[in-house]
Amino acid sequence: MTRPVVGIISNHHLINDSYQVHAGGVMNTEAVANVSGCIPILIAADPRFVSVDELLEVCDGFVLTGGRPNVHPEEYGEPETPAHGDFDRCRDAIALPLVRACVERGQPFMGICRGFQEVNVAMGGSLYPEIRDLPGRMNHRMPPDGTLEEKFALRHKVSFTEGGVFHRLMGAPEVMTNTLHGQGIKTAGARVVIDGLAPDGTPEAIYIEGAPGFTLSVQWHPEWDAANDPVSRPLFTAFGEAVRNWAASKSARLLKSA
């Protein structure tokens, strides 16, 4: 039986300052293939090449990955400043309407880091450009030096709402996660439920209230060691199950209409 298809949203990069590519981390591919049990397909996140309607038909679910470029502040009604960093407006043009369409259809998606922020912005929320500059907040950014193991090491706790969605999924009220982000949620979008917080109050886990499909999104990077990490594995496993259910329901609809 063919595995369902998960579209992995890519980022735009320049190799050697001249060669343009759409790229995605191999860790995301491994997590989708080996833990979620789905076919990973890298999406060129650019409206010149793909449309949201096409993606919704081709893919059964989506992973909104992390990435260095940030969501442009115009998407949440604020002016651009140097603190907002680099942008990928083409990805904004695909990812934000894709989130809204998936919420409406009940099609599964998981937001990771930038993807977590995209989910909030897509639902009308806003972002802080730099969390570490806020009073009482810790530095959530990736360590500038060290091995990958050191950069993705577990660095702080995330506390979940008692009896909430993430608490039930993880089987624990509190977990340890890595942290590699500069921006974070300022105001939550409509129906965005903040279900997990870092010790300094930074939102770390969200879902969309009343959405018929899987919408769990996290500010940390669960794709790191997803097959073995006790926090990452249940997240990608539950996502894969949701994608399989969507694919099965799509097949049933097609058979019924045939």
Image (cartoon, rainbow, N blue to C red):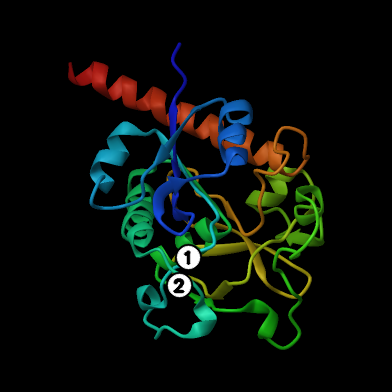
Q: What amino acid type should be assigned to the residue bearing mark 1?
A: Asn
In the rendered structure, the answer to whether residue 15 lies left or right of residue 253 reads right
Pinpoint residue 147: horizontal percent, then vertical percent.
79, 51
Q: What element carries label 1?
A: helix
Disc 2 residue type?
Answer: Gly
Report the disc number at residue 194.
Answer: none
Residue 101 relative to residue 13: left or right: left
User: Residue 13: image x %, image y %?
Assistant: 45, 55
User: Which residue is label 1 attached to?
Assistant: 120
Seen from this angle, which residue lies furthest top? 1
Above or below: residue 258 compared with residue 157: above
Q: In this view, does 177 lie to the left or right of 255?
A: right
- In the image, taking residue 81 as reference, residue 168 lies left or right, namely right
**In the image, what residue occupies the spot 51% across and 27% down?**
38
Residue visible at 74% across and 65% down in the picture = 144
Q: Which quadrant, please, contains the C terminus?
A: top left
Q: Name the residue under label 2.
A: 125
Compared with 74, 53 (above or below) is above
